Image (spheres, helix red, strand yellow):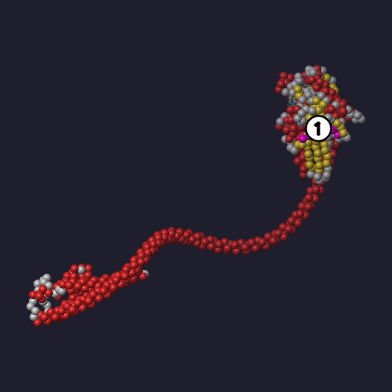
Amino acid sequence: MSTPSRLPKLAHARRVVRRSISIQSAGIAKQVLSKVQGKRTPTSGQKESSEANAALATPSVRKPLSASNHTASSRATTSTSLKRPLVTASLPRGVPSCKISRTVQQTPASINQSKELESKYKETVFENDQLKLKIASYEIQLKTLQETLALQTAQLSQKNESLLQLTTQLATASAQATNSDLKSKLLEAEIETLQGTIKSQSEQLNAKNDIISQLSTQLTTVSSQLTISESQHKATSALYQKSLVEIDDLRSQNSRLLNEAKEAEIAHKKEILSCNDRIRLLLNEVVDLRGRIRVVVRLRPFLPEESSSTSVSHLGFPDLRSISVKANNKSSTYQFQHVFGCSSSQQNVFGEVKELVESVLHGYNVAIIAYGQTGSGKTFTMRGGEGEQAGIIPRAIEFMFETKKKLTHLEWRYDYSASFLEVYNDEVFDLLADDKTKLKVSVGSGQVEIPCLKSLDLSCPEDLYELLAVSDKNRSTASTKMNSSSSRSHAVFLLKVTATNTMTNQSFSSLLSMVDLAGSERAKESEVEGARFTEMTHINKALSNLQNVIRALLKKEQHVPYRNSKLTLLLQECLGKGNSKTLMIVNLRPSGSHIAETKRSLEFAQNTSKTTIGAAVKTETH
Ligand SMILES: Nc1ncnc2c1ncn2[C@@H]1O[C@H](COP(=O)(O)OP(=O)(O)OP(=O)(O)O)[C@@H](O)[C@H]1O
């Protein structure tokens, strides 16, 4: 802050300079006046008046000079008034004193006065010279002062510049201060916002604190509960440990009991199995007692289209095992294992067959053969329709799967696989194959072998229907006078059974053949010719050969002519060989118009079962 302190000094310097200039100027003016007076020799009144005029003619120096001038003037006046008398009052204004002196008469007084004036003049000249010297000295001083003034002016302008710079800096500083003000206002606003935030957060904090205090209370409650629970837990743990020991004891007891139970179960199963085996043997004996080749008869009902001739007066049913035929006033009665009348259901028929199917599950080979003239119901009996109309084949399969399930607990495992073939014109064809190619049949080591025959595993009863759907498409049928959809071939369904017992390591395989023979009819009655006649010839030849085989078996002949036809060759394993059992179902038409063929069928059936126990006995009455 040097500037403000310097400013008064500077003003003071200026005043000093101005005063000195005024004084000097006043001095100079005096000198000039004196020179002029010196030339004109003014009177004191004129001199005073000139001084006054000069003082008045110089307005710039009038005022500052007034004091000093007054002093000088009064000094001059005083000196004048002391040294000479005042005559100016008697002189008119503007009249020079010299002129007065010339006009005045020179007297001694005036000479003295003149001498006095002369000495005064000399004094005045001297004073004038003194003044000139003073003026010269003042001029030098003035010059010095001017130089000083110039120097000080330059310094002053420098200082002014500095002052300006300082002013600029001051302005900058003040702008910065304004900026700072703005910033501070912003900060204030920010602070205000922050204060608001702090306030809301404080409120939240308070709310949270409330929650915390509530939680603390809860925690205290829970802690006390926990303490109680811990003590309970300790008590429970002790109980648990005790229980664990008891459980271990029980476990060991349990495993011991389990082992005992297992052993008992095995023993029990073994006992059941041996019982089962005994039952099987007994069953087999019963089956054998009924005859290894058994025959049942089934009379089908009249069909809707046969309603005009519904009389069965030519047939008689003395009991469940007998049937009588009246022809040409001659009545013949035939006895069989069973005779099923028109009203017998598919289930009734299967009831007779079931024990043989069971024999297959016991390891015996079985053949179930449907025999009869065309249209007598062979296919219906073997295949049947849907639901209650289902025939022997689907029912046998169903029964086998049921039995398989039942025997699982005795550790028996059964696997079934099926083939379906037909013998047409003494050639064998696979009914499950895509193309109809002849199959070769050979017998090696007592077993029938058909190399390319398809065999499908049955995992459930439903698999059978897929198989039958395929075979139905391939079966050889034709429309004849006797049957609109007559089977022109012998259809043979083969079911191979493989059984193993994991407990006893027993295993066996057996075969169930279910045969739907082609219709046995006379050429004359069927009125067939050409290809149909050839078919019929082959059909009858095969049936006749079947009869021959059965006869040979009945007579226990050494040679059984199985090889005489493909049908008997195929069926030999189930037909008479080993422990095989055969059931023949002889189907009859109810109409009296087929009485001759009915009699022939009954004759054929009688011959097949003649020598077995319980076999049909032919009795004739007249
Ligand atoms: N027990 C029965 N109950 C009702 N209808 C039957 C019965 N037996 C057979 N039929 C019907 O009689 C007709 C002929 O039967 P099926 O075709 O089974 O004779 P088939 O002996 O097989 O003849 P073919 O030897 O010519 O093939 C069919 O329409 C069949 O539905």
Which x, y percent locates residue 73? 18, 75
Relative to 47, 502 lies left or right: right
Q: Which residue is more in the foreground, 376 or 72?
A: 72
At numbered mark 1, what does the secondary structure look like: helix, strand or loop?
Answer: loop
Q: Find residue 391 and report its image quarter.
A: top right
In magenta stretch: residue 93: no
Q: Which residue is more in the foreground, 307 or 579?
A: 579
Q: Which of the four quarters of the rendered structure image does ligand 1 lie in? A: top right
Mark 1, residue position: 452
* Magenta: main secondary structure: loop
Q: Which residue is more in the foreground, 92 or 232?
A: 92
Which x, y percent locates residue 236? 65, 61
Q: Which residue is more in the foreground, 15 or 287?
A: 15
Which x, y percent locates residue 91? 9, 74
In the depicted structure, whether residue 550 falls above or below residue 145? above
Query: Which residue type carries mark 1?
Result: Cys
Magenta residues, as a range?
447-456
